[in-house]
Amino acid sequence: MIAIIDYGMGNLGSVQKALAFLGYDSEITNDPARVMDADGVVLPGVGAIGAAMESLTSKGLDKVVHEYVATGKPFLGICLGMQMLFDTSEESFGGEPVKGLSVLPGKVVKFPSDMGLKIPQIGWNELNSKNEILPNKEYVYFVHSYYCVPERQEDVAATVNYGIEYCCSVRRDNVFACQFHPEKSGEAGLAILNRWAKQTRE
Amino acid sequence: MLSKRIIPCLDVKNGRVVKGTNFIALRDAGDPVECAKAYNQAGADELVFLDISATVEGRGTVVDMVKSVAEQVFIPFTVGGGIRSLEDIREILNAGADKISLNSAAVKDPELVRRASERFGSQCVVVAIDVRGRKGGQIRIAGTDADFKGIDENASEEDNSKFPSGYEVVVAGGTKATGLDALEWAKKVEELGAGEILLTSLDRDGTKSGFDNVITRMIADAVSIPVIASGGAGKMEDFYDGIIDGGADAVLAASLFHFGEIKIEDLKDYLAGRGIPVRKLSPALKLWQSLKKDKLGLVPAIVVEDSTKDVLMMAYMDYESLEKTMESKLMCYHSRSRNSLWIKGETSGHFQHVKRAFLDCDRDTLLFYVDQDGAACHTGNHTCFFTELDI
């Protein structure tokens, strides 16, 4: 069973529907015991990182994420679920920069406003990847205004170009995360999700 | 680079697609799931469902439709038409839509845009803006004004001066003027938290004379959120112009796609040929998308030795193994026992070199002709079918 962490925000249904379509059982849950018990965990998310972190922490799920990652079982962060893995985000919440989960060292910053870029980036962009989970040169679907800057270059699994070339996926040990939405990236996305989910059966 | 999106729009009435998709033979052209699947396969980047049901019962069917589509189609889709409240929005998003679009409800109550974006995030709030040119603005296309009562042809210069962009926002299919300047309204909805603007020129809608690139450009330059151009596309060049002259981030059309007058794939080839970044599917992905998969999402592959025409084996493929087979020209399968990629011959040295491949008439089985190194069967037999039955 794959646990999709429910911290009361965002549309968690699409991830579950995509996993079901691929033949994987999943459960949307905020129960720490169910999360720890799972063969794989997805941390999804859309919206504001401040509110998401607050909601996650208030339910004690921040600790659960750390504990789960320490088990070595497959962990997948999607979109905001990737951004929350880092130390801090520029996205302010009540005037303060937001503190993340610090699962990975690095920060989250906003797309530059002086380059004439549409913000948020909405649409399909092409992956530059050398990672076996991610296909190179395949298009995947993005919706976001902030992006991750990992401290360690070796954590970067793929980059993408939106005026600037930035990191859109990270991989370190059992932690895999992507800024794009594999559950909304058509067959290319389903293949990525399937390749990740296969690990939960090993 | 971010690609420009091609978006087909489907009108839905009482949970059924009106006008269907005629570009491909579907068992049921009115089934939203079938239509969405067909468009996904055709390479659509996103879908818009516009509910035109006139009754409350009709509208009730939208939620079920959204659920069914979300279970089967994994590209983003927007649902618009008749959405009036936060509760309507919540229901449709929870059913699995990625975005909702607000049109007249936003004009009536602009704060709804703010509340929706605060509660659900800007990324799922599209504001649809329908516009018509005021006198002195964009030149009207003859023949489209017959039923239009909203804008006074004989309006004085003073009246028109209230619309600095030369365009007025209209609602109810263009039958009601709002008094709002199109450009001002676009800026306002961005400020309220809209994540995207779906801009439809009702002067151009149905005329096939091209998007109204004047107002599209004005709005695209004035806001930092993406603008989807709609209304008027008739030929491939119109889409190019909408993107280059209009500055649109995405282009939308309805019947042009439904009736197969323009195929999305051809349109993308055309745009790519003129230097516009579009999402193209790799050959492996394109083939995989078109196949019928079994319950486990796999497709059986029959393997025949090219020289002897002996049937060697049957195994299953998933997307990964098909992609790898096409790339390496060596047969790869999905091992159901190990649940992983199986490169035939990797441990035994008994590789299978692909010569030719065929597709079954039902698109649910693949046939490969190969040159076999050594034995095909793991028992050391030439073929896996070495046990003759007494029947």
Image: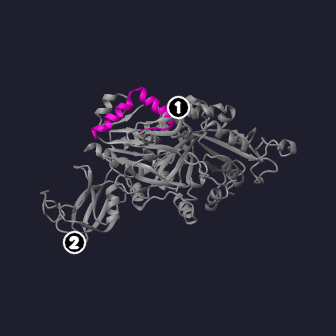
Look at the numbered disc 1 and give the secondary structure of its residue: helix
- Residue B253 at x, y = what percent? 60, 52
Q: The disc labelled 2 sits on which kind of residue?
A: Thr
Q: Is residue A174 left or right of residue A146?
A: left
Q: Nearer the viewer, residue B260 or B219?
A: B219
- Residue B96 at x, y = what percent? 47, 38
Residue at screen point 33% across, 43% down:
A23
What quarter of the picture does the C terminus of chain B occupy?
bottom left
* Residue position for label 2: B308
Q: Which residues are magenta?
A: A44-72
Coloring applied to the structure: one colour
Q: Nearer the viewer, residue B215 or A57?
A: A57
Q: Main secondary structure of the magenta part?
A: helix
Look at the numbered disc 2 and give the secondary structure of its residue: loop
- Residue B136 at x, y = what percent? 82, 51
* Residue position for label 1: B90
Q: Is residue A92 above or below residue B337?
A: above
Residue at screen point 41% across, 40% down:
A85
Q: Residue furthest bottom?
A: B307
Residue B311 sits in quarter:
bottom left
| Residue A84 tag number | none
Lower position in the chain sequence, tag 1 or tag 2: 1
Q: Nearer the viewer, residue B19 or B106?
A: B106
Question: Is A69 one of the magenta-colored residues?
Answer: yes
Instruction: Give the letter of the chain under mark 2.
Output: B
